[in-house]
Image (cartoon, grey):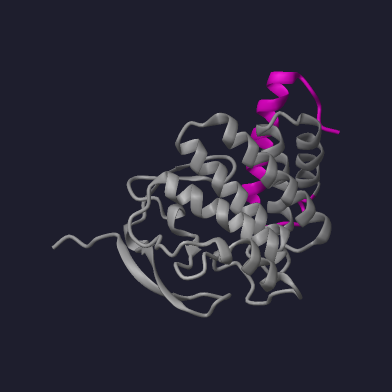
Amino acid sequence: MEITPYYDKQITCIHCKNNFNTTKIRKSTVKIVTSDTDFKSNYYSVNPTLYNVFVCEHCGLAFTEDFSNYFPPGTQESLQRRICDHWTKHSFNGERSLNQAIQAYQLAIICGEIKKEKHVVLAGLALRTAWLYREQEKFDWEMRFLESARDEYIECYLHGDYRGTPMTEIRVLYLIGELSRRINDEETAIKHFSKVIEKQRTTNETRIIQMTKDIWQEMRGSNNKEIS
C-alpha cells in the first residue's frame, strides 16, 4: 500500500493555548530535484514549504516552529485586537494550494511583525513567500518579497539576531548579496559578496564560498567589473 506524504500533527497555539491539527509532510517522501541560488529547493512532487506555517483555527495566529513562545509586553493584546478579534474560525489543515500557502505566510508575517519576532524569522517568511510567488511565475510579487527579505536580513545582520539559529553569519551575508542581485541592487550585492569572499579562510562553509565566486564570475562577465 502506497504511503501518503501527508500526516496530521497536533499543535498547541502559542497565543490562545488551544490545540489544532496541521498537515505536515513525511520527510521520506520529499525529493529535491534542483536548488536555486537563493536556497529555494525545487521538489519532484509535494512541496513541504507549503506547510511550514501553522494557522490556529481558533484565534487566527499564524506562526512557525521558529517563533518564540515569549510575547514582549503589549504584543498579545495587540495580536488579539488586530488579528484574533476579526478572525472567523476556519482550518488550514489538509492539502494546501499555492494560494492558501501564500495566505498563511502573509498572515504569519503580519503576526510576526506584531509579535516583534526576530528579523531572521521575518526574513525567512518573506523569502519563502517570494519562492511561492516564483512557483506561480508572479514576478512583481516575487520581487516585492525578495526585497522585503533582503531588508530583513540586513537588519538581522546588523542586530546579530541570527545567532543561536541555524543561520550563520556567512549565510546571512550571502543571502543579502544574492537577494540584492536578484532585485537589481548591484551595489549592495557586490558589497556583501565581497564580505563573503573575505571570510573564505576562516569558514568551513565552502559551498557558500564557491556559490559566491560562481555568481561573481557571472556578474563580472555581464558587467566587466572587478571585486575590490
Position of residue 105 in the picture relative to residue 223 (left or right): left
State the residue at coordinates (76%, 56%). Answer: 156
- Whether residue 125 is visible to the viewer of this picture, yes or no, is yes
Q: Which quadrant of the view contains residue 160?
A: bottom right
| Residue at the extreme bottom of the image, as rendered | 17
Name which quarter of the figure residue 20 lies in.
Answer: bottom left
Vertical position of residue 99 compared to residue 228: above or below? below
> Bounds of the magenta span?
199-228
> Is residue 223 inside the magenta stretch?
yes
Residue drawn at x 46%, y 53% is 49
Q: Residue 34's spot in the image, x, y percent?
A: 44, 41
From where the camera sits, is residue 205 visible? no
Q: 49 and 175: which one is in front?
A: 49
> Does residue 79 appear to the left or right of 22 in the view shown?
right
Magenta region, main secondary structure: helix
**32 is within the stretch colored magenta:** no
Residue at the spot x=72%, y=40% of the render? 177
The quadrant of the image that shows the C terminus is top right
Q: How many marks?
A: 0
Q: Quadrant of the N terminus?
A: bottom left
Q: Residue at x 52, y 64 (%)?
A: 60
Q: Is residue 157 above or below residue 184?
A: below
Q: Where residue 99 sits in the image (x, y, percent)?
A: 44, 44
Residue 66 in the figure: left or right of residue 31: right
Tell me residue 211's x, y (percent): 63, 41
List x then y, in percent, for residue 157.
Answer: 78, 55
Q: Is residue 82 above or below residue 12?
A: above
Name the outermost residue toward the left. 1
